[in-house]
Image: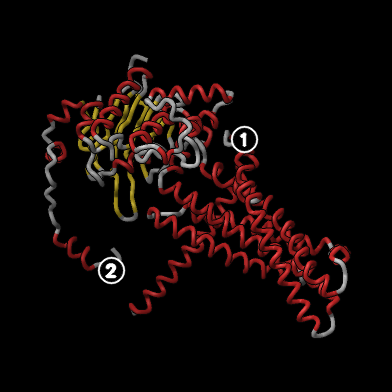
Amino acid sequence: MNALARPLGDLGRATLGAFAGVGYAAMLLLEACYYVFAGWRIGQPVRIAAVARQMREIGANALPIVALLGFTVGLMLGIQFIASLSEFGAQSQVVVAVAKSVTREFGALITAILVAGRSGSALAARIGSMSVSQEVDALAVIGIEPVRYLVAPALVAMLVMLPALTIFANAVAIFGAALYSAPALNVTPTAYLLQTMSLLSTGDLWQGLSKSVVFAVLITLIGVSTGFSVSGGAEGVGRATTRSVVLSICWIIVVDMVFSFFLNR
Amino acid sequence: MNAPVPLIEVEQLEAWYGRRRVLHGVDFAVNAGEIRVIMGGSGSGKSTLLRHLLGLQRPVSGRVKLFGVDLREASERALLDVRKRIGVSFQGGALLTSLTVGENVALPLREHTTLDESTIRIMSRLKLEVVNLGGFQDLMPSQLSGGMVKRAALARAIVMDPRLLFFDEPSAGLDPVVSAELDELILRLRDALRMTIVVVTHELESAFKIADTITVLDQGNILTTGTVAAVRASDNERIQDLLNRRPREVQVDADAYLKRLTEEEA
């Protein structure tokens, strides 16, 4: 009996914990939105300077690495599509294949995974070490709501910058694909890019962008909620950082699949 | 104000961590202008009491009132108003590590006032001078020593000229000279700025030096509240243990002991 009760108990506790985590994150989201829209009325305004700082950290500072990865993924897709489509003599379809797979899928996915690793973990580490050293308490007693000061600016910045980075990644990836594929197709890169433009619909772009908005919310919420729930000193901060990255990436991929399913029905 | 008005009123405050009761119906009040030291050994519940006084934890039952405002029932606005009138210096300082010392001290002014930047700068430097940290405003908290961090935290706590100042373990981890300096500083603040000060500490020497009145906590109960002389003269055994650094005589309850040893989920 005991042998069965224990794993069942563990399962129950884990389930409860998971639900509590989702609930906590949802509450943080609501609170952050409240402070963004109505904070100034109760003396808790979300500062534009704080949002700008987060935008720089999350967005501008990530440009080089997003460019590098976007370019590489574009190149890789070009290589793969040329190789596999030429088996059917359908190389000319490379343009549309790259254009759609990048804008609908890879641009948003690669950018989100990268930002989760860069900024989601940074949020978790920052808030985690702040709660360990009582800085979060200090903010609260100074009269600065921690959610307003730490979460709301990050959420706004992420919601603006992740889609922006995604657009940038799309462009760089298609450019990368063009560099490899254009010679293989005997066209100039410019002609390749022009053809891409004519083949892409706004729907393709929206698909990627709408996903990136959802990813932005996920990355922020997972980062801050793991950060706030840190306990156990420096080791706890390390654990929370790892946890936030793993959780974010898992959620991003699962949500991506779900979105792809519903958006392509 | 002639009659002493209690700035802090605590009635029947209870606190639990899981199944363990940390505060057993604590009652106490602090009047304006006094320096109250809350004293007790580790695990006596003094940090928990402080967290309730600061409104960081909601009471399970009982009331905590600051300036007559019940923290549990206060609206967000009212709570913010209370928080603008208190200052807190945490045990580890709790300076924001991403800001310089000067920015840390200026933070409450930036958030709660509409003063212009140069006024804020002057006011925060003034408070740094008060705690003998003039000229250190551009350093990061990580570049300061332990005593300097505490003093910087104190500067941040008093930058809004609070009527009520909380100080958690002012002398923990500091050498005797620095901690004596901090004690002097606390006395000066009360005399110069007319603050009411609540200090939580387990350091006897510093407690006796600065306190007007002392509250002794032990295992979640208030043993006594009184003047320094009264506490010293108390005939309560636990208080005398604390004053004379006598180890506690732990009485073992055989049943509870066995239960703790054998229970699966302690």
Q: Nearer the viewer, residue A192 or B5?
A: A192
Image coords of residue B209 (percent x, y): 22, 26
Image coords of residue B8 (percent x, y): 36, 30
Please tell me whether mark 2 sits on a helix, a strand or a loop.
loop
- The total of numbered circles placed on residues is 2
Q: Nearer the viewer, residue B216 or A51?
A: A51
Query: In this rendering, which labeled residue sits more in front, label 1 or label 2?
Result: 1
Quadrant of res B206:
top left
The quadrant the N terminus of chain A occupies is bottom left
Residue highlighted by disc 2: B264
- Say above or below: A250 vs B98: below
Residue at 33%, 18% in the rendered image: B191
Residue at 28%, 63% in the rendered image: B266
For the question of whether residue A53 can be seen, the reply is yes
Q: Nearer the viewer, residue A229 or B229?
A: A229
Quadrant of res A88:
bottom right
Residue type at the position of mark 1? Trp
Q: Nearer the viewer, residue B234 or B38?
A: B38
Residue at 14%, 30% in the rendered image: B232
* Chain bearing mark 2: B
Mark 2 crowd level (few <14, some 14–19, many ≥20, 10 Å Cα): few
Residue lying at the far bottom of the rendered structure: A87
Mark 1 crowd level (few <14, some 14–19, many ≥20, 10 Å Cα): few
Quadrant of res A216:
bottom right
Q: Which mark is residue A40?
A: 1
- Say above or below: A44 vs A185: above
- Say above or below: A22 vs B190: below
Residue at 79%, 80% in the rendered image: A85
Residue type at the position of mark 2? Glu
* Chain bearing mark 1: A
Image coords of residue A160 (percent x, y): 69, 50
